Amino acid sequence: MTITTRFYCRAQRSPQDLKEALAHAITRCCSAHHLRRLHGRAVAFGLRHNLYVASLLVARYFHFGDPATARLAFDDGRRGGPSKTLLWNSLIRGYLNNGSPRSALHVYLEMVAARPLAQCEPDRVTFHLVITACTHLSEFDLGSRVGGHARAKGLDSDLMVGTALLDMHCRAGEIGPARKVFDGMASRDVVAWNAMIAGYSRVGSFYEAVSLFNAMRLGQGVLPSEATLVSLISGCGRSGSLKDGETIHADAIKLGFGASLFVVNSLIEMYTNCDCLGVACKLFDRMVFKDAVSWSTMIGGYVQHKRPHDALKLFEWMIVNTQTPPTRSILVNAILACADLGDWEEGKLIEEKYLTSKQSESARDPSMVTTLAYMHAKCGKLDVSLDLLDRVEVRGDTIAWNAVMKAYAELGIVDKVLYLMLEMQRRGINPDQVTIVTLLSAISDATFLKKVMEAHSQIIKRGFEMERQIANCLVDAYARSGSITDSSRVFDEIAEKDVVSWSTMIKALAWEGKAAEVLNHFELMRETDTRPNHFTFLSLLSACSHAGLAEKGWKIFNCMKEEYGLEPGVEHLTCVVDMFCRAARLSDAYRLLKNVMQRTISHAALWNTLLSACRLHGDVVIGEAAARHLFQLEPENAANHKMLADIYISAGRRDDANGVLGLLNANGLDSIPGCSWYEAGRTTISRSKSKADTATAGRMQANCGGACCHETKYS
């Protein structure tokens, strides 16, 4: 029996039965044509003005993608007398779900304006829908006013309204008002918790996000969802918190989300951002099903880590072996890989195959055209880039011009950067902050003081001198060009200095070897309550190292984590090791490396610095220990063996030196026929392998566990 037949059977009863039968038929109809027939029946039976039937018609017309007829059904329902909130909500929800949040807001404003006559007050559903529409449109001021209306009605603590409000505040970056709404909610479901956690992650307050996550699970017993974990993992990626990311990864596995597509995609991105590309690759390889986001994230990860060749190989494998369509994001990453390689032919091939079709939406996308212009410029095809800049999609678009300027700045071709700057002005395109920053970066890398001064005059002429980002770049540009006086003058004129301002000035002073002024600026920075970052401490440690201030540098290194909670990176460790080695405190350097072994295990440069210092100062014991680590990390590097041999020679242990060099020759690592050293003014050349050589080689192999004879891989 069809829906229409059942409708007629039920229609033989009472008017109430007729309404219910029609309503049932409308909710079950399967096509727009069938819905219009039922709409005609509603008109014939005098139910077109029935608010319940009209609201169902509105919802179903939106379901079938016909907003115009939905509006007609709404207007019919209103003509029957005072309307109900249900009818208005159907229209607002329909526009919102069909991607027309602006129309949804217009309906709300119409509802509020008609309220005295319509006798219809917004309810919790109305406020939820309207605040959501404001969030989609970034109409945060209007959303706050709607939230105030809901608060006046006592609905701000309602679950639906409260969740919409706190999500809106979080997306606006207003984390304080969002938390106030969250704390005032009578009850909270997982969606509310997710919105608050996502808000903290988005603004970089990762500690608060994790605390809320723990309170959600342990304090309130609310089970996290995929969205919870994705928000936290994304926050880890943005903040570079690898340790926290690994903890949440373990939680995801325990909670049964270890194979979730959305969670794994976010994990790949997080590990990529935290410089663990190997882990990201393993996760990607283990995925049973990969969507376009998976491929885009992994290809983009290779590009981000300066492995464009691997990015293109993965892109080509995806095209040949999968049915995944090359989305805009995937194509952007593939073209960026071509730009990094300077492979114009491959980039042109991708462009012709996927972006020349008139049906291709990506070809008309401004960001895609900008990426293509950048790629052609990076490959030295300025004429092609200029042709792309004349395309309708990006004509007069400063972002596109900035991308081409950035390409030539990265190539170090300063004259092209200057030419593009002048060409922009000839075409009446006003440069923005990014344009000026790109220009300053190019001319400062070339250390052209005259050009920096000319750019400075242009900055003043265009009224950019008060922009902090540009002022920070000027400080750096003058310092790179050798004018620390001008750097200091620009720095002093910055009204509100941020951490970048202070860090840039400290770095400039460190380059000049002015350690006392570096430390003085650091103290002034702390007095302004500006929180230093990793770059600040790197400049401080570098200055202390070159000035021989080992004790002061060690205090600063400890202050980094103890006072500011910043985990030292390999660059900071390198500075401290170099600082101790310069001060002949080799035992302190060795102790530091042993304490942070897990983080330094794959960084041979740290142990190489220590071994080189041991050769300089003649420390055999620590030199042997450093050499053992280097033989594991770089089994084919002959220089490490020769440095250890030099240490033995300085200590008068020629047999041990011959043993090390014999081991070097035995492994085929020494391309030099022999090694020589000076003794009492004459040169002794050793090329033979005696029993003593073999014995010493055996001792060295035993000490390093044989690792020096075999290649060891580290992920």
Image (spheres, rainbow, N blue to C red):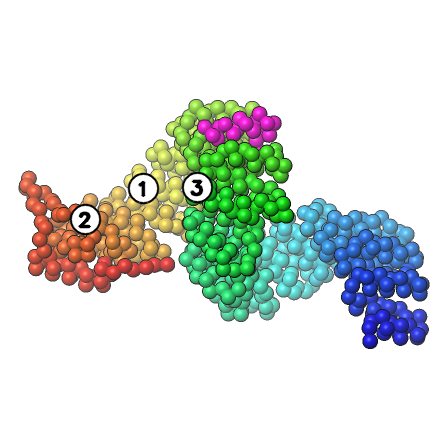
Q: Residue 428, labelled with which disc?
A: none
Q: Are marks 1 and 2 in contact (CB under 8 Å)?
A: no
Disc number lying in front (1 or 2) = 2
Is residue 287 part of the magenta span, yes or no? no
Residue 577 position, x and y percent, is 30, 48
Give 412 or 81, whichever is nearer the viewer: 412
Residue at numbered disc 3: 342
Residue at numbered disc 1: 545
Residue found at x 34% / y 49%: 573
Residue found at x 56% / y 29%: 424
Q: Which residues are magenta?
A: 415-435
SS under mark 3: loop
Q: Distance of mark 3 from mark 2, alpha carbons?
A: 34 Å
Residue found at x 59% / y 65%: 225
Q: Is residue 37 left or right of residue 654?
A: right
Which quadrant of the rendered structure holds the C terminus?
bottom left
SS under mark 2: loop
Q: Distance of mark 1 from mark 3, alpha carbons?
A: 38 Å
Instruction: Inspect the image, locate mark 3, and give the three-letter code of the amino acid beneath it.
Output: Gly
Considering only vertical position in the picture, is 427 above or below 149?
above
Q: Earlier in the sequence, mark 1 or mark 3?
A: 3
